[in-house]
């Protein structure tokens, strides 16, 4: 592995500004690591012996993002360069941030406070030469995520670090150093102090990675999984019978791998069978059923995502996908059945629901599902849409004001009659005209106790 990296021209100019003002500057952390691995860094962080107020004197556009810990963000050309004074951290009393920091003039001392050897390297801006006091390059070559110094001390300082270890191992396809992994279960109580938002962000990065199962299996073996998703951990050892090759836990992990790499789809795939342990019934040897697990799973997934502070839009979409994932399409479905299915699940959910079903099928045996099984459903929906057929109340030829004009009172009763009219249209699209629907609505008045003609 090369001992130097390429520093972009504009960043060399950034460092020169500090040097001209009499200060030392190095680029540190993830940008150095990613460059050594042949990846293009997304962000560049700088470390300097300049104090925050001195950095703010050197540069015109500076945001005091974490000035109490020596960090400011310099807006330099088209970049945001997080710039931190060389420091030594005090006690981490909240399990995430040092209560105090002590500024230092020593780069090596500054690097010693970082989490993993792969992140404890720096690069000289002029030459690109890598400063590597803790063996980060050797660990990169070995594919090892290794804590700097005593891993228990590192994890007790910052409870998020064990999850970050898993995320890095997942992202790069690395293993976690034996001593570093052994420190995770010892420090679980510190991890439990980390905010749900920070856990959510790290988990999300694992799930949208190229092979999320790497991280998910590590979460399990490290003991982190019950502290993050106890509902998923409860699926371990729950057998399924029939064509299922795996228990519920491994089925969900493999379905997650098979899903398209969007957060909502990966979450839905990972959580779609959470209801199976509670709904499992054994009728005889190998004769199992899981009736209602889709509804139970939707409720459990919703509660878990709310606990982890996922946005409402993500939680609601994942819940809807799980609630509706147990459909069994075949060419025998009538057009009316297709229309009713789309009306029930909602047109915006359809493509993702099909992708979830394919991921679910792949998770049964570990073999990718043939998309041709469900693509005909998409084509049929598109053909029905091309004929301008109604799938929702909004698609109907009449609206609430049309019903009000013939005497239907606004409110829940009007909602009920609109649903009945939609049901009629789903069965027979020819009824979707204003004249015909008003005629049906007039006939329905007797059913609901309204005088005809009012």
Image (cartoon, rainbow, N blue to C red):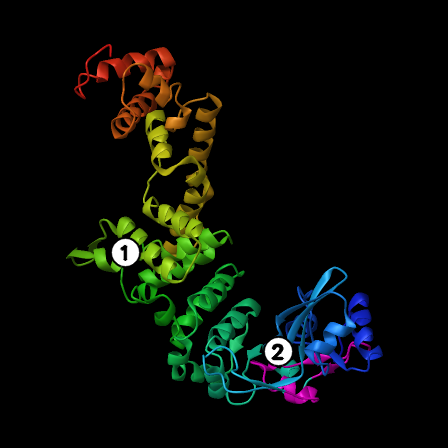
* Residue 273, x across and y down, in percent: 32, 55
Q: Nearer the viewer, residue 166 or 114?
A: 114
Residue appearing at x 47%, y 73% in the figure = 163
Above or below residue 231? Residue 356 is: above
Drawn side of residue 249 relative to residue 96, left or right: left
* Residue 38, x across and y down, in percent: 69, 68
Q: Nearer the viewer, residue 170 or 422?
A: 422
Above or below residue 312? Residue 125 is: below
- Earlier along the polypeptide chain: callout 1 or callout 2? 2
- Magenta span has 396? no
The answer to whether the residues at label 1 and label 2 have Cβ atoms under 8 Å apart is no
Residue 184 visible to the viewer: yes
Tell me which segment is drawn in magenta: 103-131
- Magenta span has 118? yes
Q: Nearer the viewer, residue 445 or 362?
A: 445
* Residue 323, x across and y down, in percent: 32, 46
Q: Quadrant of residue 337?
A: top left
Residue appearing at x 47%, y 82% in the figure = 155
Drawn side of residue 394 relative to residue 52, left or right: left
Q: Secondary structure at mark 2?
A: helix
Number of the label disc, if any, that sits on residue 119:
2
Q: Quadrant of the N terminus?
A: bottom right
Q: Which residue is mark 1?
A: 275
């Amino acid at each position: 592995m090369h001992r130097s990296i390429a520093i972009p021209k504009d960043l060399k100019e950034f460092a020169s500004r500090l040097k001209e003002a009499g200060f030392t500057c190095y680029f540190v952390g993830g940008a150095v690591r990613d460059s050594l691995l042949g990846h293009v860094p997304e962000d560049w962080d700088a470390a300097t012996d300049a104090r925050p107020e001195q950095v703010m004197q050197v540069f015109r556009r500076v945001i005091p993002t974490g000035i109490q810990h020596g960090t400011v963000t310099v807006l330099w050309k088209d970049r945001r360069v997080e710039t931190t004074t060389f420091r030594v951290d005090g006690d981490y009393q909240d399990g995430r941030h040092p209560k105090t920091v002590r500024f230092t003039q020593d780069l090596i001392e500054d690097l010693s406070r970082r989490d993993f050897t792969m992140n404890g390297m720096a690069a000289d801006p002029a030459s690109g030469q890598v400063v590597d006091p803790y063996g980060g390059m050797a660990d990169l070559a070995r594919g090892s995520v290794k804590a700097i110094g005593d891993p228990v001390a590192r994890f007790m300082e910052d409870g998020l670090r064990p999850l970050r270890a898993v995320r890095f191992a997942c992202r790069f396809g690395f293993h976690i150093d034996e001593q570093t992994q052994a420190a995770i279960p010892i420090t679980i109580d510190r991890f439990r102090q980390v905010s749900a938002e920070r856990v959510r962000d790290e988990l999300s990065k694992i799930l949208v990675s190229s092979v999320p199962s790497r991280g998910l299996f590590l979460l399990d073996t490290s003991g982190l999984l019950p502290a993050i998703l106890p509902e998923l951990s409860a699926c371990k050892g729950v057998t399924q019978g029939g064509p299922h090759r795996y228990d519920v836990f491994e089925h969900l992990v493999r379905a997650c791998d098979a899903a398209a790499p969007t957060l909502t789809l990966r979450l839905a795939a990972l959580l779609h069978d959470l209801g199976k342990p509670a709904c499992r019934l054994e009728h005889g040897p190998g004769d199992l059923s899981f009736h209602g697990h889709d509804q139970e799973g939707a409720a459990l997934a919703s509660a878990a995502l709310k606990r982890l502070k996922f946005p409402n839009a993500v939680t609601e979409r994942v819940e809807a996908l799980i609630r509706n994932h147990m459909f069994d399409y075949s060419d025998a479905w009538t057009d009316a059945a297709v229309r009713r299915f789309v009306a029930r699940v909602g047109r915006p959910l359809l493509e993702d629901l099909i992708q979830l079903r394919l991921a679910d099928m792949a998770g049964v045996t570990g073999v990718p599902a043939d998309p041709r099984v469900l693509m005909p459903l998409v084509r049929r929906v598109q053909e029905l849409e091309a004929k301008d057929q109604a799938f929702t109340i909004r698609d109907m030829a009449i609206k609430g004001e049309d019903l009000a004009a013939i005497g239907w009172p606004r409110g829940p009763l009007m909602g009920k009659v609109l649903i009945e009219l939609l049901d009629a249209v789903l069965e027979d699209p020819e009824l979707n005209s204003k004249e015909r629907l008003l005629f049906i609505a007039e006939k329905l008045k007797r059913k609901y106790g309204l005088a005809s003609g009012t």
